Amino acid sequence: MEYVINYAKQRGAFERKISSFQAIQHMIADMYVRIEAMRLLTWKAAWLIDHGGEDAFIAASCAKLVGSEDAMKIVTALQIYGGRGYLESCRIAKLFRDVKLYQIREGTSQIQRHIISRYFFREYKPTMRGSY
């Protein structure tokens, strides 16, 4: 995220810094929200693992799913770099390739969805009262 912010502050287009464009500002805001969501899910999973929580396994799958998918959405920020973002010499291009690997390694997103849905149909115990 720091790379993108620094680049947006330096790069000019149409006689303005691109950091002044609302579309760029919104992309950076979305990046921050996704990073915070990933961080909180990861911390929750780690806390449950450390404290023997029954749902630790499912929390880890949720963190892996959201983390890998949101990381891919975040690195699409290479759009901010324009054509330069695809050059081998650009750091964001390497991040884009690396993040794709995270979606596959240690269980694809589809596998994580399968684990999560199986949990809800086999092991989940509702905490709310009432019938639906």
Image: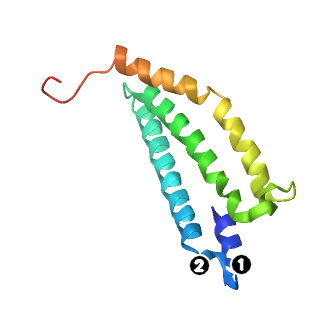
In front of the other: 22 or 50: 22
Amino acid type of the residue tagged 1 in the rendering = Ala
Residue located beneath label 1 in the image: 13
- Return the x and y of residue 128 as percentages of the image width and height: 18, 30
Q: Quadrant of residue 106?
A: top right
Nearer mark to the viewer, of 2 and 1:
1
Q: Quarter of the image containing the N terminus?
A: bottom right
According to the image, what is the colour scheme of the structure?
rainbow
Please determine whether, in this image, residue 14 is positioned above or below residue 5.
Answer: below
Q: Is residue 26 above or below residue 36?
A: below
Relative to residue 98, is residue 51 drawn left or right?
Answer: left
| Residue 102, label in figure | none
Residue at image coords 70%, 81%: 14
The image shows a total of numbered marks equal to 2
74 over 119 or under it: above or below: below
Question: Which residue is at the far top?
Answer: 122
In the image, 100: left or right of 51? right
User: Which residue in the structure is indicated by mark 2?
Assistant: 20
Q: Residues within 10 Å of mark 1 (few under 14, many from 20)?
A: few
Tell which circle, 2 or 1, labels the residue nearer the N-terminal end. Answer: 1
Q: Position of residue 36 (x, y in %)?
A: 48, 54
Q: For residue 83, which quarter of the picture?
A: bottom right
Is residue 18 or residue 74 the one in the foreground? 18
Residue 21 drawn at (x, y percent): 58, 75
Dot 1: what SS?
A: strand
Q: Secondary structure at mark 2?
A: helix
The quarter of the image holding the C terminus is top left
Q: Residue at x 47, y 38 (%)?
A: 46
